[in-house]
Image: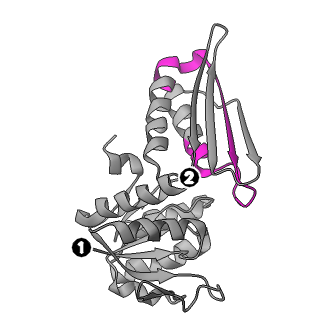
Amino acid sequence: MLKLAISGAGGRMGQRITHFAQQDKDVQIVTLLESDGHPWIGKNVDGVIVSSDPSHLKVSQAFIDFTTPEATLKNLEVCESLDVKAVIGTTGMTAAQIEKVKRISQKIPIVLSSNMSVGVNLVFKMIQTVAEKAGKDYFIEISETHHVHKKDSPSGTAKTMQHIAEEYSGQRVRDMKSFREGEVIGDHTIVFESDEDVITVTHHAKTRDIFAKGSLVAAKFLAKKSSGLYSMQDVLGF
């Protein structure tokens, strides 16, 4: 049984990850973390007391974090010292912060992904295929919409779409649009347009559950890994 720690336990993603972990017979939640001063500190969640002390990670085998870049890196340093495997869904990291994640992955295995959804990762694969075949014959545009609470813009998923499209087409994405509306979970669209036709690939997230479920798949994937930086593409075998 995988002994699991979850950061941001009181947040929207943390609560959904906890919910599905509780239903998984192969997972046992042993640590729940929140930031200092959060109203969930001290709360009992099925026998696990929510804490702000990352040293509680010592009883865990794997750790899932969908919080902020600063909090994630702080927790990763503790994971490194305690040899705890990590799944990181946090977005908005700087290049320097990502480099630090890469360095830590030399000591512990880490899954780092801008989007843990199986569906979105299928979309990533589709974008690769279209970009390879369309090449420079198509202009490329991306748009994404999220809830008004999302801090980073464009989204990490949109940036990944851009990276894949540019790498495999050999040209720059012409336009990237970001919108923040209501409580939208996440909508992403990439358009390849030529003088003759338009190819559109779209993903609409109906609930956050797709990300929560994907993070648990990623945590189990790490069970037999000793070090290295992995993506959800690796986890899903794409």
Distance from the alpha carbon under mark 2 to that under mark 1 = 27 Å
Tell me the residue that label 1 is attached to.
1
The amino acid type, in three-letter code, at marker 1 is Met
Viewer-nearest residue: 95 or 41 = 41
Residue 101 within the magenta-colored segment of the rendering: no
Instruction: Give x and y (percent) for residue 84.
Output: 35, 76
Residue 41 appears anywhere in the view = yes
Instruction: Name the residue: 47% across, 49% down.
Output: 117
Q: Secondary structure at mark 1?
A: loop
Check the image and report above or below for 206 versus 60: above
Pick the residue in front: 183 or 88: 183
Magenta-highlighted residues: 131-160
Tell me how the rendering is colored: one colour
Q: Quadrant of the C terminus?
A: top left
Q: Earlier in the sequence, mark 2 or mark 1?
A: 1
Left or right: residue 196 versus residue 1 is: right
Q: Residues within 10 Å of mark 1 (few under 14, many from 20)?
A: few
Relative to residue 77, is residue 140 drawn left or right? right
Above-or-below relation of 131 to 51: above
The reply to whether dot 2 and dot 1 touch (C-beta < 8 Å) is no
Give x and y (percent) for residue 152: 69, 57
Q: Please name the residue that numbered disc 2 is placed on.
A: 207
- Within 10 angstroms of label 2, few (less than 14), some, or many (20 or more) residues? few
Residue at 34% across, 80% down: 60
Q: Secondary structure at mark 2?
A: loop
Q: Residue 134 placed where, x, y %?
A: 52, 18
Does residue 106 appear in the picture of this structure? Answer: no
Residue 116 relative to residue 222: left or right: right
